[in-house]
Amino acid sequence: MTNLLDNCSQFRLNNGLIVVLAKTETATVAGKLRIHHGAAYEREGEEGLAHFLEHCLTEGTNKYSAIEMTRMSHLLGYSNAATSVSDINLIGDFLPRDLTMFLDMISSAAFEPLLATKEVDEERARILREIADARGDPAYETRKRFSREVLGKDNPLSREILGNPEVIKLSRA
């Protein structure tokens, strides 16, 4: 175990996962499973696949149906998933008694996703709506241009995390 700060330690599990523990004054636990693959790692023709995968990971696993995943997520104080330029994150804030449930849920989502056609198609539709909504924002083009001007059009950090609608439309489970 490595001490990172006075209140933080890190260790690696036998399966290679890195665990970081931070002692806080709160009565809740915050957890995150970080998958180091976000928009910056996508090649041409893959724009948005990390975001698409993030949506699909919580829509059922080999162990839990989509309904069971939703039910467990509601039992936790907070549970969500997010994609960034560098990562896909499965996150939660919950009571200590729910730690085992959270770890079981996110490990099942990350390592045993079901990727059932019905749920994947539903998520595809959600993502296409999300992209359309983002592009409909009056500031969308300004943010996009600013990012490309500052970072460069080929810089992975200037990629759109939500994705390319044409890529999302063609993606299959």
Image: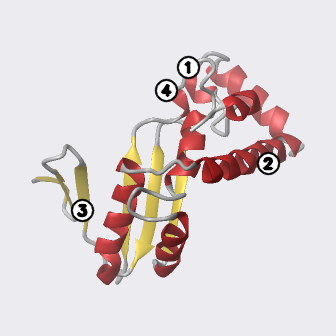
Residue highlighted by disc 3: 21
Task: Kindly state the secondary structure of the residue where label 4 is placed.
Answer: helix
Other-residue count near label 2 (Cα within 10 Å), few / some / many at <14 / 14–19 / ≥20: few
Q: Nearer the viewer, mark 4 or mark 3?
A: 4
Q: Residue at x 58, y 50 (%)?
A: 55
Q: Quadrant of residue 7?
A: bottom left
Between disc 3 and disc 1, whose residue precedes?
3
Residue highlighted by disc 2: 129
Q: Residue at x 63, y 20 (%)?
A: 45
Question: Residue 88 location in percent, x, y?
Answer: 48, 45
In the rendered picture of this protein, how many numbered marks are placed on residues? 4
Amino acid type of disc 1? Arg
Which numbered circle lies on residue 43?
1
Which numbered circle lies on residue 41?
4
Amino acid type of disc 4? Tyr
Question: Residue 86 location in percent, x, y?
Answer: 48, 36
Amino acid type of disc 3? Leu
CA separation, marks 3 and 1?
Answer: 34 Å
Image side of residue 75 versus residue 130, left or right: left
CA separation, marks 2 and 4?
Answer: 23 Å
Q: Quadrant of residue 35?
A: top left
Task: Kindly state the secondary structure of the residue where label 1 is placed.
Answer: loop
Between disc 3 and disc 2, whose residue precedes?
3
Q: Residue at x 19, y 62 (%)?
A: 6
Which numbered circle lies on residue 16?
none
Amino acid type of disc 2? Arg
Question: Residue 167 location in percent, x, y?
Answer: 69, 28
Between disc 2 and disc 4, whose residue precedes?
4
Question: Can you name the residue that lies furthest to the left here?
Answer: 1
